[in-house]
Amino acid sequence: MIPIEYYLILSAFMFFMGVIGVLTRRNAIIVFMSIELMLNSANLTLVTFSSYLGNVVGQLFVFFVMTVAAAEAAVGLAIIIALFRNKQTVNIDEINILKW
């Protein structure tokens, strides 16, 4: 049996990589994927503690997080496609459509 610490270390590493991706990258699609990586890290933590404690509540929360992530993916990609059609770029620094 794999110890709980391994799962939590993997989850922390995934979350840290997601944060690094959001803070350092300027491509909107890469930032979007980094946010998804952070959500998956949180899901891994929820499933780990759910399994460790023998309670299914954490696994139910994962289904809700996955539902929100799917909706976010649909809306986020639609926004990115609309911005690309208007500005011909997905670089976050060049997209200033909401500024006055």
Image: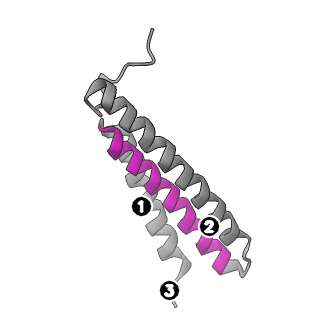
| Dot 1: element | helix
Q: Residues within 10 Å of mark 1 (few under 14, many from 20)?
A: some
- The main secondary structure of the magenta stretch is helix
The residue that appears at 74% across and 77% down in the rendered structure is 55
How far across and how far down the image is residue 26, in percent?
30, 35
The residue that appears at 74% across and 70% down in the rendered structure is 57
Q: Which residue is mark 1?
A: 13
Nearer-N-terminus badge (2/1):
1
Residue 46 highlighted magenta (yes or no): yes
Q: Which mark is residue 90?
A: none
Q: Where on the picture, by quarter, is residue 98?
A: top left
Q: Which residue is mark 3?
A: 2
Q: Which kind of residue does numbered mark 1 sit on?
A: Phe
Q: Identify the image quadrant of the C terminus.
A: top left
Compare residues 14 and 95 and report the one nearer the observer.
Answer: 95
Q: Which kind of residue does numbered mark 2 sit on?
A: Leu
Nearer-N-terminus badge (1/3):
3
| Dot 2: element | helix
Q: Which stretch did the figure color magenta?
A: 27-51
The residue that appears at 34% across and 24% down in the rendered structure is 95
| Dot 3: element | loop
How far across and how far down the image is residue 56, in percent?
72, 76
Q: Residues within 10 Å of mark 3 (few under 14, many from 20)?
A: few
Q: Which residue is mark 2?
A: 46
